[in-house]
Amino acid sequence: MVKSIKKASLPLIGSLHQFTEIDVVEVRERLLKWYDANHRVLPWRSIAAIEPDRSKRAYAVLVSEIMLQQTQVSTVIGYFDTWMKKWPTVEDLASATLEEVNQIWAGLGYYSRARRLHEGAVKIVKELNGEFPNDRDSLIHQLPGVGRYSGSAVASIALGCAVGVVDGNVNRVLARVRGIGADINIQSTTEHMWSLADKIVDPERPGDFNQAIMELGATVCSPKTPACGSCPLRLHCVAYQKSENQQEKSSISSHFKKFSEKVTLSEISDIECLADCDLCLRKEDWDVSLGVQNYPRKAQKTQSRQESSAVIILRNKIDKMLLVQRPRTGLLANLWEFPSIALSENGAQDKDVTEELVSQFSLPHTAASSRTFVSDVIHIFSHIRQTYKVFLISLSGEKKLTWPSRYQGGQWMTKEEFLASATSTAMKKVFKSMEISEQKCTNKKKKLNNEDNSSEAKKQKTISHFFTAAPKKKIP
Ligand code: SF4
Ligand SMILES: [Zn+2]
């Protein structure tokens, strides 16, 4: 009875999942030593290390952290450099327009991140006197789009606050090092990860320590190919020791089997925790073949939603394309895109869809019949698998620019203007599909022309051969 009350309020956690005082000292020392010798040189790290102005440091780290959410380091580097050249300070960013911000962000995806970054800059300049908030909590509470992770990263890396960070890499390292096999998405496990991160962070070098543990997760303790042999935390790692024990058990077991002798596996030492600990991996879930990769426990995948829409690339006689601007809020807010219309699930609207678009954009009725199908383009958003059915309509006459009220505006754009505008990766794929399709058409035409020319040449040869006088016989 007492136990069930305890379980309802607090998870039952064995000491296996905590750092001892000795662990704390040794893990800090080993990890920092490893980081000093192995870390990657990245532009935001250099700014955080040498920039004396705290607001400039905080701004650079914030930009990099927001860009790094959902995007790989290698992609972020180029975007970060361009961004910092254009807006080297928070004041510069605050004076930019959202349109400009979206243009520079174009291709990174999740555009709400860019909008919030811009809103945050405006707030710092207008309401906070150009000064960044001082610590993790104020960063989270005062800046839009700054959550627990990015607030902790900016506070520790740029401002020297002794707070831990938890992201996907840190979750993996901590789950393996402390043998945490509970679902990392449930609240009590998340809280435990944060308490471990706050405890283990080095108060003398919090920024370096946090970057070290993230770097270890990204480069050594990777999801599928962990390099335990070269890991500085091997001696503190429950997953590693457990996996080694299992291998030892299997080899002893097979050795004794060979000699027909009996061995009880429990006789070999194992890593024990509380009998009903809430953070342990359940015995029946341990997969010998996975080793340390049993941690962290895989979250159940949610199936992505399937959606499809028809997209029209409408091109006028001077080769410009019609782009419309999405609403100010919601998915892909403010971005430019080709006119589109959602298709119903069973595709019943498919055949009428261009007529619908033609009427929404007040195009001449002949336009619908002149459409050509380009191809299907598939793009995966976070939870949506979107299929675009791409059509091309080339207009021969003048077209007055109108658009339905669901869009903010419309504009005819050249290819170069389109590529430089704030548009999504999905729309760039749509455009590319048209270029590929047109290239194929041109190649086909060239091939046909070549074939025609060569058969014409053959024909000519045959005819000229007919009229050619027979060679004169030599008279001996
Ligand atoms: S020993 Fe292996 S599993 Fe443990 S932290 Fe290092 S790389 Fe990860
Ligand atoms: Zn346990």
Image (cartoon, grey):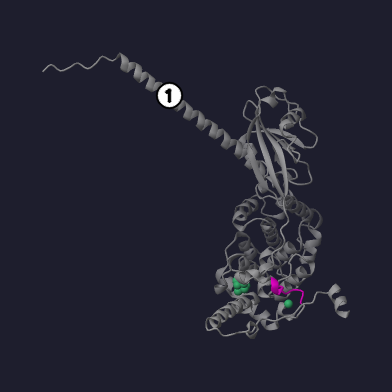
Examine the image and state in which quarter residue 13 appears: bottom right
Q: Nearer the viewer, residue 385 or 474?
A: 474
Residue 209 among those drawn in magenta: no
What type of secondary structure mainly makes up the magenta span? loop
- The residue at the point 66 percent across, 46 percent down is 379
Crowdedness near tag 1: few (<14), some (14–19) or many (≥20) residues, C-alpha within 10 Å: few
Q: Position of residue 432 (x, y in %)?
A: 60, 39
- The residue at the point 68 percent across, 68 percent down is 296
Residue 280 among those drawn in magenta: yes
Q: Nearer the viewer, residue 330 or 11?
A: 11
- The residue at the point 70 percent across, 57 percent down is 66
Q: Position of residue 193 (x, y in %)?
A: 73, 71
User: Which residue is disc 1 drawn over?
Assistant: 453
Q: Position of residue 332 (x, y in %)?
A: 73, 46
Name the side, left or right, on which 470 lies relative to 326. Answer: left
Ligand 1 near label 1 (Cβ, under 8 Å)? Answer: no
Observer able to see residue 233: no
Observer able to see residue 93: yes
Q: Position of residue 86 (x, y in %)?
A: 65, 49
Q: Nearer the viewer, residue 449 or 157?
A: 449
Examine the image and state in which quarter residue 309 appears: top right
Q: Amino acid at mark 1?
A: Asn
